[in-house]
Image (cartoon, helix red, strand yellow):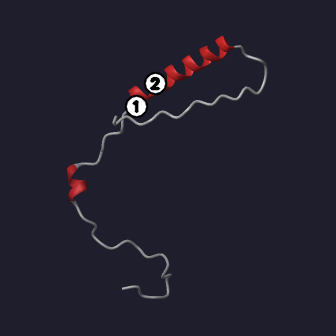
Amino acid sequence: MSDAPEEAALEIEVRRGTPDEDELAALIAVVTEGYATERATAVARPDTRSAWSLAQRALREPLRRDLGWGRFGG
């Protein structure tokens, strides 16, 4: 069994004109190549937070906005 994800089937809907098989094949080749190039060059953004910010803990609990100004939420 391969670990690679299965490729979805390609569906093309022609809305205007009457392209022949060669024109559709050229379109599919160009779009597929563009997608493959984008997929190969895509990288996740590195985590830009410092080790200090990752290690520090919150100084207080987050504000509870559902309590309003008139009541104590402690």
Above or below, comparing residue 49 to residue 15 in the picture: below
Measured Cα–Cα span from mark 2 to mark 1: 10 Å
> Which disc is residue 73 wearing?
none
Q: Residue 16 placed where, x, y %? A: 78, 24
Q: Which of pointers 2 and 1 indicates the residue nearer the eye?
A: 2
Residue at image mark 2 = 36
Q: Is residue 55 left or right of residue 47?
A: left
- Where residue 27 sits, quadrant-wise, is top right
Q: Which residue lies at the image location 21% right of the left edge and 54% below the top edge?
A: 52
Q: Is residue 44 left or right of residue 28?
A: left
Question: Percent x, y for residue 66?
Answer: 50, 78
Residue at point 36%, 38% (across, down): 44
Q: Position of residue 39 (x, y in %)?
A: 43, 29
- Which of the 4 image quarters holds residue 42? top left
Question: Which residue is at the far right?
Answer: 17
> What residue do we see at 79% from left, 19% from top?
17
Q: Which residue is situated farthest in the top direction here?
A: 22
Quadrant containing the C terminus is: bottom left
What's the amino acid at mark 2? Answer: Ala
Q: How many marks?
A: 2
Which residue, given by chain and number where applicable, does mark 1 sit on?
Answer: 42
Q: Residue type at mark 1?
A: Ala
Please indicate whether residue 29 sits to the left or right of residue 50 in the image: right
The residue that appears at 40% across and 85% down in the rendered structure is 73
